[in-house]
Image: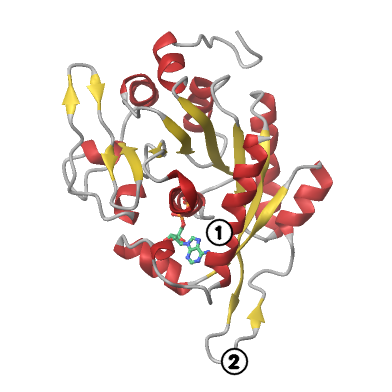
Amino acid sequence: MNKVGFYLQDPKITEKMGKIKHKIAILSGKGGVGKSMLSLMLSLALAKNKHRGLVGLLDADITGPSIPKMLNLRDKKPTISGETIFPIESEYGIKVMSIDFFLKSDDTPVIWRGPLKSKAITQFLSQVEWGELDFLIIDLPPGTGDEALTVTQTLQGNIDGAIIVTIPSQVSKFVVKKAISFAKELNVPIIGIVENMSGVTCPKCGAFIETFPGKAGEEIAKELNINFLGKVPIDPKLSKSLDKGINLLAEDLETSITVKNLFEISAKVEELVEK
Ligand code: ADP
């Protein structure tokens, strides 16, 4: 039993999670700030560095699953054997699981009531056979509502910690602080904060343009004494690659600050969890 109430650890989840060295949840104060982008790019960067085949990505954003679309895997169907569900293996060296693989068509909405949603998450955590992994990255539902609470409670005690994503605006700063309190309340350690959409480089003159008047990510990190993991500037090549299901990190893009920063963030995360 914890502060929030009623929670009991499922032994099957503990068994499955026990085979995975590091479990990291990605959390945001609200939707649309780049939580799925970071979950995916972090997984791809870890796989590209030295963990190919040893990175799992769980799309736990039950109502807005977007990882299969971002990887062009929407037509894949996971193999099921008895109670065991096998993840889809992406050509980029990561294993993926999402509710999206089980939906009938592009337009099928996920209008499920709370108990069904929480059952889906529990099933994923207890029945998906990831095998031995170095990392499992979990893309949590946005915000601090029922869904995020259910998933985080189910994971509690089984994860290394959470990475918080924000954009640099003051509005986002206000909301993201709630996400940090939420994680603290549930005893989930905070690995650090990532500031996404921190400006954009002008393709014509190369000048760096700040998208929001502020440095919310760095400010929060300082105020709350948590690690600042880095900034991810807006990069049209990144959004295009995510729309098309192409791995930007597989390409030779040494000129992109966004790609460089994503690799640096992944290296920092690796260092922090392996400490
Ligand atoms: P969330 O999971 O927080 O709802 P997403 O990761 O889906 O947000 O991001 C919202 C949209 O913004 C997506 O289309 C994504 O491709 C795009 N996006 C996110 N971060 C960046 C970035 N740094 N540069 C360009 N596009 C981005």
Residue 204 in which image quadrant: bottom right
Foreground pick, 273 / 175: 273
Q: Position of residue 215 (x, y in %)?
A: 74, 62
- Inspect this view and state whether residue 102 appears: yes
Could you tell whether 64 is left or right of 197 in the image? Answer: left
Q: Which of these two is toward me, 81 or 204?
A: 81
The structure residue drawn at horizontal position 40% and vertical position 46%, both measured from the top left corner, is: 52
Q: Amino acid at mark 1?
A: Leu
Residue 95 locus on image (x, y percent): 34, 40
Q: Quadrant of residue 167?
A: bottom right
Q: Tell me the SS state at disc 1.
A: helix
Q: Position of residue 8 (x, y in %)?
A: 51, 9
Q: Are marks 1 and 2 in contact (CB under 8 Å)?
A: no
Q: How is the image coloured?
A: secondary structure
Name the residue carrying label 2.
205
Q: Nearer the viewer, residue 250 or 239?
A: 250
The residue beneath circle 1 is: 262
**Relative to 89, is 121 above or below?**
above
